[in-house]
Image (spheres, rainbow, N blue to C red):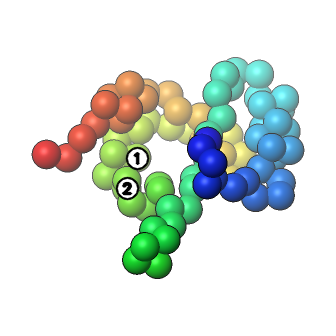
Amino acid sequence: MDDDDQWTGNKLSHQMHLLLANPQVDVVFGNFLNINLATGENGFGFNQNRYSMSLLENENISADAFLITGNFLKVLVFRIS
């Protein structure tokens, strides 16, 4: 996070619940809204990075959570030339 980032009201409690309910999970991250204050454009990060996110291998562990089972490092270094 940096100085212009904001959390939704239930972000931390939601992520803590997920961690406590799933001991196999080591790290939790979530979608985010990018807002360009200069242009007024915005979009969700997972949508903006749809292709690289599609490379992740995952399994559903709850209604709105997935456990990444493969390609995490590949996605971290992925870049469109």
- Please say if the residues under marks 2 and 1 sit with CB atoms less than 8 Å apart: yes
Image quadrant containing the C terminus = top left
Please state if 31 lies on the left or on the right of 54 as rendered.
right
Separation of disc 2 and disc 1 at Cα? 5 Å
Q: Which label was assigned to residue 75?
A: none
Label 2 sits on residue: 50
Identify the residue at image location x=38%, y=32%. Answer: 76
**Position of residue 5 measured from the top left corner of the image (x, y, whole percent):** 63, 53
Residue 75 or 8: which is nearer the viewer?
A: 8
Residue 67 or 37: which is nearer the viewer?
A: 37
Identify the residue at image location x=73%, y=54%. Answer: 7
> Label 2's element?
helix
**Position of residue 49 measured from the top left corner of the image (x, y, whole percent):** 37, 53
Structural crowding at the residue carrying mark 2, measured as other residues with C-alpha within 10 Å and reported as few (<14), some (14–19) or many (≥20): few
Q: Is residue 55 above or below residue 7?
A: above
Three-letter code, disc 2: Arg
Three-letter code, disc 1: Met
How many labels, in total?
Answer: 2
Identify the residue at image location x=33%, y=45%. Answer: 52
Q: Is residue 53 above or below residue 38?
A: above
